Image (spheres, rainbow, N blue to C red):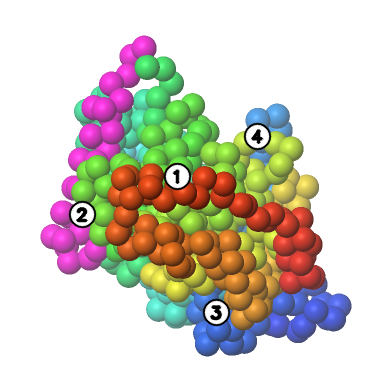
Amino acid sequence: MTYFPNVTKIKFEGKDTTNDFAFRHYNPEEVVEGKTMREHFRFALAYWHTMTQDGSDPFGAPVNQRSWFGETEMETAHNRVDAFFEILEKLDVDYFCFHDVDIAPAGESLEEFFANLDEITDHIKEKMDETGKKLLWNTANMFSHPRFNNGAASSNNAEVFAYAAAQVKKGLDLSKKLGGENYVFWGGREGYETLLNTDMKFEQDNIARLFKMAIAYGEKIGHKPQFLIEPKPKEPSKHQYDFDAATTMSFILKHGLEGDFKLNLEANHATLAGHTFEHELNVARNFDSLGSIDANQGDMLLGWDTDEFPTNIYDTTFTMLEILANDGLAPGGINFDAKVRRSSFAMEDLLLAHIAGMDTFARGLKAAAKLREDRFFEDLKEKRYASYKEGIGANIIADKEDFESLTEYALKNDNPQLESSHIELVKSKLNDYLV
Ligand code: XLS
Ligand code: CA
Ligand code: CA
């Protein structure tokens, strides 16, 4: 049984190919800066957008044509596993990510949910052994069910905290079973509606409590994936505690979680927070905490999380510059947290959309590598900060000056001359690298 009978394994054919089911820029074996593209990207597919997203929106019914529905929920869940691994194989993608609820039906009780997860992950494990595909990360969906109305670890209700803990424990057990390399926490409901009834400090301390339990449990079972927190400023909650990279780092440092926890950054979440994605990546890198990324893009004209496939070369170039400067993402990777537009409802759009994303990242990588080879930004920044290379500047960064000595200097040199940035020229020259 195959779900994509008309598509064979997608290969690199170069930019002049007329075959839509081919990579035009992504060549997994091509070496850039000493590593193959496959090693640079560590691409992953998101189970939720690929297998369970149905194309519905707040105004309309499901539209996605999918051929994996069976007679029962469990039959559908098993069919999805087969179809998913076929997609991974055909796209030549090595990794995948999932929420617990994406892969198995919730059933009537937590016990039944866990039993369903065990059965489906047996199937996933078989497929992994057969194909060599790997789990980049899994996570617990602690935001969709009504019980999480007021949060999971940050809920005012202690029974919800216990339920969330049980879900994370199960997630770590499954991570161990499947050899997961990272484990993600995204707190969509970990935030608040109004301070009128909210003890923010209490709620945040409780989130840290749950995270410390996760570290302790990982140590206990001898399986500690890299823990990742995924920031997002809003949606579904109005105020989400993990607003952006900087806010999340202050939480990590305040609670002594550094070392065990890094960041999983998503492009569309960055723009929702009023930042560029490269800003978020740069902040994380400055804390030595860039763990993994969720690749997608938002829409400039829409103020919500549209999770579009990344097709903007400018953005992927800046993303790859940060990733190269980070010396890669491993054990993290690039997860396509992206969904096809509602009008792309055909089965094959799942493949075409990922091809588009992978090709756009390949172009970004090549442009970034060329910019680095030419020292485009290095030379520019070196020149811009040149005043710290000698004289008073060199003394400042060598911590040899103080207020008195600097005042003495300023009194004699009270007319600093600035140089123009020529920023339009820089942007115009940069464009030459992108086409
Ligand atoms: C939602 C988030 C979510 C996380 C995993 O906006 O992107 O999908 O990546 O829970
Ligand atoms: Ca995400
Ligand atoms: Ca998102």
Q: Which residue is mark 4?
A: 303
Task: Categorize mark 3 by other alpha carbons within 10 Å: few (<14), some (14-19), many (20+).
Answer: some
Q: Residue 33, located in which quarter of the rendered image?
A: bottom right
* Alpha carbon distance from label 1 to label 3: 57 Å
* Alpha carbon distance from label 4 to label 1: 50 Å
Give the left or right position of residue 214, taking residue 342 as reference: left
- What's the amino acid at mark 4? Gly
* Residue 260 showing in the rendered view: yes
Residue 66: % across, % down:
66, 55
Q: Which residue is mark 1?
A: 411
In the displayed structure, 199 sits above or below 244; it is above
Q: Residue furthest front?
A: 412
Give the left or right position of residue 203, taking residue 150 as reference: left
> Which of 30 and 327 lies nearest the eye of the viewer?
327
Q: Which residue is mark 2?
A: 215
In the displayed structure, 275 sits above or below 336; it is above
- What's the amino acid at mark 2? Ile
Mark closer to the chain start, 4 or 1: 4
- What's the amino acid at mark 3? Arg
Q: Are marks 1 and 2 in contact (CB under 8 Å)?
A: no
